[in-house]
Amino acid sequence: MLFGNSFPNGLQMQEMLGWIYTGGGLELWNEMYQGRGVKVLPPYGILGSENFCWSRKPINSLEDFKGLKFRTVGIWGKCLERLGARVVSLAGGEVYPALERGVIDACEFATPAIDRKLGFQEICKYLKVPGIHEPCAPLETLVNENAWKKLPDSLKLQVEIALKASCFWAMNRALKQDAEAMNFFLQYPGLHVSKLSPEMIEEIKKIGNEELDKYAKKNVFFAKVLTSQRNFRKLVEPYADLVRLPYPYAKQ
């Protein structure tokens, strides 16, 4: 969950890669698989923020989640249940027909670029952003530990450099493709695209942190990883806020 970044208010894309490469994330990732014959290498790619949800009904406040049949999984499902939603777990291939037939009222699935290909805009009137439940998703690279050890150091270095280059390409491709997809959604006839209010985001963050803390109390390693991520964010966020240019700058 923590390495996949699939929980409310997880690390942003640059934060996540920074934590993996320089903040001890990759070392912790390997620690998780210790004793299982698996070596974790740098992620081969990364996906950007998911859409928050597609829905057949408008969601303008947290009250609107009450009774909503919402397809999702994991800790985000626990958060939605606390908001009164009826969480439904469905395989990927079942989501579109379930929405189409009204078996579910809403779903989260993937990034704008992926969701566009699946055609959710054809059957849903409402799209909510941003995807606070999954701000990004690094793509895991696993190899056989014993086989890895047998490789010469020069080849290991080449593989790691290739993975980092692949991730860099994927990150930049996601930026362009997701932007193109969102522009498509904004112009799609009959589709209402809107943002979560700051009040909704703050309450979701609060609930998410409470659920994460519950997991941390039950699992020492989970707590160790969660603390590492939170400490990394405390380090980099103040600087990021200090140097971030205001959005209108991009329009000049």
Image (spheres, rainbow, N blue to C red):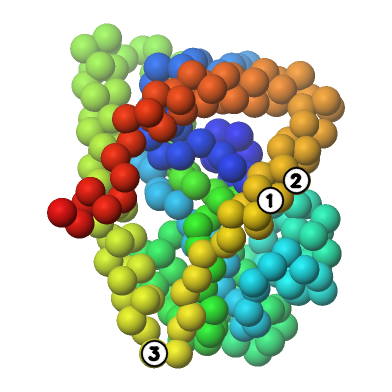
The Cα atoms of the two marked residues, 3 and 1, are separated by 30 Å
At 75% from the left and 45% from the top, the residue drawn is: 207
Residue contact at pointers 1 and 2, CB within 8 angstroms: yes
At 75% from the left and 52% from the top, the residue drawn is: 79
Residue type indicated by callout 3: Pro
Q: Position of residue 193 (x, y in %)?
A: 47, 74
Which of the marked residues, 3 or 2, is nearer the chain's N terminus? 3
Residue of label 3: 189
The answer to which of 207 and 154 lies nearer the viewer is 207
Residue of label 2: 207
Residue furthest out toward the left: 252
Q: Position of residue 127 (x, y in %)?
A: 51, 73
What element does badge 1 sit on?
helix
Residue furthest out toward the top: 153
Residue type indicated by callout 1: Ile
Q: Where is residue 137 in the image (x, y as percent from the top left)?
A: 47, 44
Q: Position of residue 87 (x, y in %)?
A: 77, 65
The Cα atoms of the two marked residues, 3 and 2, are separated by 35 Å
Residue 204, numbered label: 1
Position of residue 144 relative to residue 86, above or below, is: above
What element does badge 2 sit on?
helix
Please state, as top left, top right, bottom left or bottom right, where the C terminus lies in the image: bottom left
The Cα atoms of the two marked residues, 1 and 2, are separated by 5 Å
